[in-house]
Amino acid sequence: MKFHIQTDRLILREWRMEDAFGILKLNSNPDVIKYLHLEPMKTEEEALDNIKWVTDQYSKNKIGRWIMLKKSTNEFMGWTGLKLEDMEMNGNKYFYDVGYRILPKFWGKGYATESVIASVKYGFEEMKLNKINAAAHCKNIASCRVLQKVGFEELETFKIFNFQAYWFEYTKGEYFSKK
Ligand SMILES: CC(C)(COP(=O)(O)OP(=O)(O)OC[C@H]1O[C@@H](n2cnc3c(N)ncnc32)[C@H](O)[C@@H]1OP(=O)(O)O)[C@@H](O)C(=O)NCCC(=O)NCCS
C-alpha cells in the first residue's frame, strides 16, 4: 500500500525496506527512546523486521505509521502517523493511535506538530474516524505539547509498564467544529 501526503515542509509516505538504516539510527538513539518502553535497536535485521511489521499492518488494517521525509532535501527524519493499536491501553483495544518519532537534529522546529496535523486530517477526513487517541509518558513534555497544540484533550493518567502516562483523545466533533 502506498501513501504520499505532503505538508508545507514534509513528505509522509509508506515504510520501505530502504528505510532500514534510518529506522536503526532512530531506534538505537538513547535520547529518542528515553520515554519509550524499548531496548535500543542493534542491527539492520531488527530494522527490517520492524519495517515488515508496519507494512503488514497496511495490508491488514489499511493504515499504519508513515515515514517522514524533509521535503526540501528528501532526508529521512523519522516516522509519524496513525496505527490501529491492538495492545490494550487504559482499557482500550483496537483504537486509532497517533504517534511520532523523530531524529533529534530535527526536534524543536514544529515538524512533529505539522505531521500530526496531517495525520489527524487523514484520519477524520479520509478514514472517517470518530476519534483518535494517543498516550505519552507524563515526563515527555515535548510529546504532550505536540498533542495539545494540535487539539487533543488530556483526559486522564494511567499506568503502563512501569510509568504513568497521559491518555489523550480527539473526537470528530471537536475536529470539525474547529474547521
Ligand atoms: C516528541 C517529538 C516527536 C517532538 O518533536 P518536535 O518536532 O520537536 O515537536 P514540535 O517542535 O512540533 O513541538 C514540540 C513542543 O514541545 C515544546 N518542548 C519541547 N521540550 C520541552 C521542554 N523540555 N519543556 C517545555 N516545552 C518543551 C517545544 O517548545 C514545542 O512547543 P512550542 O511550539 O509551543 O514551543 C520528539 O521530541 C521525539 O521524536 N522524541 C522521541 C520519541 C518520542 O518520545 N515520541 C513520542 C512518544 S509518546
Image (tube, rainbow, N blue to C red):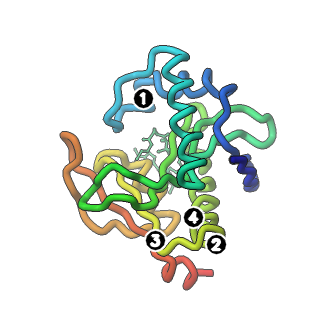
Question: In the depicted view, which residue is nearer to us: 140 or 15?
Answer: 15
Residue behind mark 3: 131
Q: Residue at x 48, y 69 (%)?
A: 151
For disc 2, does the CB lie below 8 Å from ligand 1?
no
Q: For the residue marked with disc 2, what is the amino acid?
A: Glu
Picture coordinates of residue 129 (x, y %)? 53, 71
Residue behind mark 2: 125
Circle 4: element type: helix
Q: Which callout, 4 or 1, points at the residue further toward the start of the chain?
A: 1
Question: In the depicted view, which residue is nearer to us: 21 or 136?
Answer: 21
For disc 1, does the CB lie below 8 Å from ligand 1?
yes
Q: For the residue marked with disc 4, what is the amino acid?
A: Val
Marks 2/1: CA–CA distance: 34 Å
Q: Which mark is residue 31?
A: 1
Q: For the residue marked with disc 1, what is the amino acid?
A: Asp
Picture coordinates of residue 126 (x, y %)? 65, 68
Picture coordinates of residue 158 (x, y %)? 21, 56
Circle 3: element type: strand
Marks 2/4: CA–CA distance: 8 Å
How packed mark 4 is, by other alpha carbons closer than 10 Å (few <14, some 14-19, many 20 or more), is many
Q: Are marks 2 and 3 in contact (CB under 8 Å)?
A: no
